[in-house]
Image (tube, coloured by chain):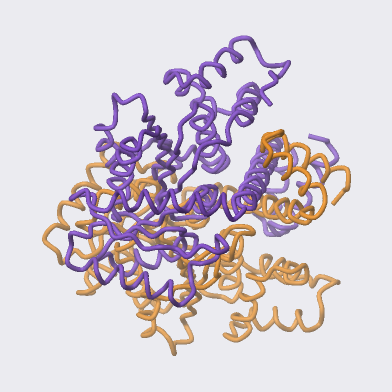
Chain colours: A orange, B purple
């Protein structure tokens, strides 16, 4: 299972061994390579992938203002109390143009730093080429291979890319807060149905009871029950401010893992995750091949499409024919 | 330029002619076909594409709660006052699982209905296969070919797909509202840099002056000036509630179009849009070809990846080899 790749450099072989030992600097370096993804990086990541597969991967998603970052921090502390280690991958919304990342509430994570049993990685969208899903899930693999017991993926939960990322978790927690506006509620609809567990945040507020009741009513109507056969999503009211019910949330998360394993559903879920990751990787590869044609056939097709002599779809079909012929 | 495709059915030929005449029922039917995109639909859409290219396409984006829907409605009324017709494509956040669309504040658009010079289309995310960009931009083509002078595309402005859609506009207006939280501001960063015009909404509020000042400070620092050479993005304070400065916003939009045409920048922007649409179409096509293999080679690759004997990237490379050999 851990047979070294003959093409792997000695340095990379050492790096992988250090990741397996859980050394923080090696973990951070391997994560940077997951973002860069050169051919050499991919060979090293393939070895990391083989060593991963033991961690419980938990996706935590919620709209802006839902208080999910604070909840993730509280949950991480709770996991540490149970003598388990925890890795956190936080996906930041950021500019696709500058590549810059807005730290925002990430800084509040600071009280977890200095603890070797916690590793936090913030990721920014990496620009136009390819989505976030591949680097984010490769980063989860690094934490998994490094031996972290639980890996939390925190996303804002808007857009197909983020839905893909959170769908690659074994257990999905959707965070809802009381008192958010209509626009926000509309966005939330996209992730409600993939929840295994609903956490309601800010339950020290008066209007939280209504949010809990709304979610429970939605579940009674049979929505949100599509992911795990035989599992009824639960609603957990929490308050990170008052540190209340964070233990109950962790119990629900652990209970969902037990359900997955005992029911045999885990195998099916892992297959779905593998399929999604293969298709994403294939799409990224094709996109890279297409862009390599920028100076050649593509330039001519852009001219014809700009002049409206050829539709984008017709141009795309000609472009794909070119790729096949060139055996790129 | 409008040579009929020999393979086009007589009925489709009639439908396209009716779209060109601006008949609402034909427009609506063609839009449904843009969402379905069967091979016959694509042939009809290619003809629509050839007839499009005259409208001024304006992207209007802003985070949840920014008040952009209200602003779009006010702007549409202002465009009508200037004796121009206007089409609106509103992209709704919605569930990727149910395919359902949350109407929310769309209903407030009702006071524009009954006016033949306005056509409004709401679109929902169409599920896992392919993104929103292709159907949304094909829908813009339908309105363009139907003779609408201005086409407004309204998006929430989060996620790569939405950034792609709004980047396909000739003029991009980013709507900012005073008093939104930090999480929301962070999300906004992704679209601020593609703005040609910044509209600040809700300027009847006391704290709006600070939002205007913040945006102007950002522009002074040289950010947000990457899209149009020789164009300095302007900040327009508006209040849709009090109908104030909507005329000034429309003047800024018209002024940007004049700049694009006079500077020759329009040609460059149209080429960038064509390139994006071709690449998106190619990616959609490849995704469809990959999914057709679900029963064959992909099933075996999923097994190997689930067992971690093969990395997702290695599996993807084998899958793509399969496509090439089969000449799918």
- Residue reaching furthest left? A206
Q: Position of residue B34 (x, y in %)?
A: 54, 29
Picture coordinates of residue A200, whole percent (x, y): 26, 59
Location of residue A60 by image quarter = bottom left
Rendered location of residue A139, percent (x, y): 58, 69
Compared to residue A139, the image places residue B47 above or below, namely above
Residue drawn at 30 percent across, 53 percent down = A184
Q: Could you say which quadrant of the image residue B220 lies in?
A: bottom left
Residue B294 vertical position relative to residue A113 in the rendered view, above or below: above
**Which of the image's four quarters has the C terminus of chain B?**
top right
Asked whether B91 or B87 is in front, the reply is B87
Left or right of B166 on screen, residue B43: right
Q: Left or right: where does residue B6 sit relative to residue A202?
A: right
Query: B129 or A17, which lies in front?
Result: B129
Judged left or right of residue A155, residue A51 is right
Q: Is residue B51 above or below residue A20?
A: above
Which residue is more in the foreground, B159 or B235? Answer: B235
Against A143, residue A256 (above or below) is above
């Amino acid at each position: 299972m851990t047979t070294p790749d003959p093409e792997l450099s000695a340095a990379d072989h050492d790096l992988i061994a250090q990741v397996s030992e859980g050394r923080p600097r090696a973990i951070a370096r391997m994560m940077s390579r997951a973002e860069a993804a050169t051919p050499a990086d991919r060979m090293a990541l393939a070895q990391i992938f083989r060593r991963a597969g033991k961690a419980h991967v938990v996706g935590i998603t919620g709209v802006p203002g839902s208080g999910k970052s604070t909840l993730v921090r509280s949950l991480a502390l709770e996991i540490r109390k149970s003598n388990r280690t925890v890795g956190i991958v936080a996906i930041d919304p950021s500019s696709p143009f500058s590549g810059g990342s807005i730290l925002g509430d990430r800084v509040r994570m600071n009280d977890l730093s200095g603890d070797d049993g916690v590793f936090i990685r913030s990721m920014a969208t990496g620009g136009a080429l390819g989505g976030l899903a591949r680097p984010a899930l490769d980063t989860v693999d690094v934490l998994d291979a490094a031996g972290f017991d639980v890996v939390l993926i925190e996303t804002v939960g808007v857009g197909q890319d983020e839905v893909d990322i959170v769908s690659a978790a074994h257990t999905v927690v959707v965070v809802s807060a009381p008192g958010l506006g209509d626009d926000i509620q509309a966005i939330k609809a996209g992730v409600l149905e993939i929840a295994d567990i609903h956490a309601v945040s800010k339950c020290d507020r008066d209007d939280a009871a209504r949010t809990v009741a709304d979610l429970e009513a939605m579940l009674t109507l049979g929505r949100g029950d599509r992911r795990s056969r035989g599992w009824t999503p639960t609603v957990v009211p929490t308050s990170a401010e008052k540190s209340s019910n964070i233990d109950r949330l962790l119990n629900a998360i652990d209970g969902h893992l037990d359900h997955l394993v005992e029911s045999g559903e885990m195998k099916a879920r892992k297959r779905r995750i593998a399929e999604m990751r293969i298709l994403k990787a294939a799409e990224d590869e094709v996109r890279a091949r297409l862009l390599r044609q920028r100076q050649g056939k593509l330039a001519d097709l852009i001219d014809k499409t700009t002049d409206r002599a050829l539709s984008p779809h017709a141009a795309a079909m000609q472009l794909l024919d070119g790729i096949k012929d060139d055996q790129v």
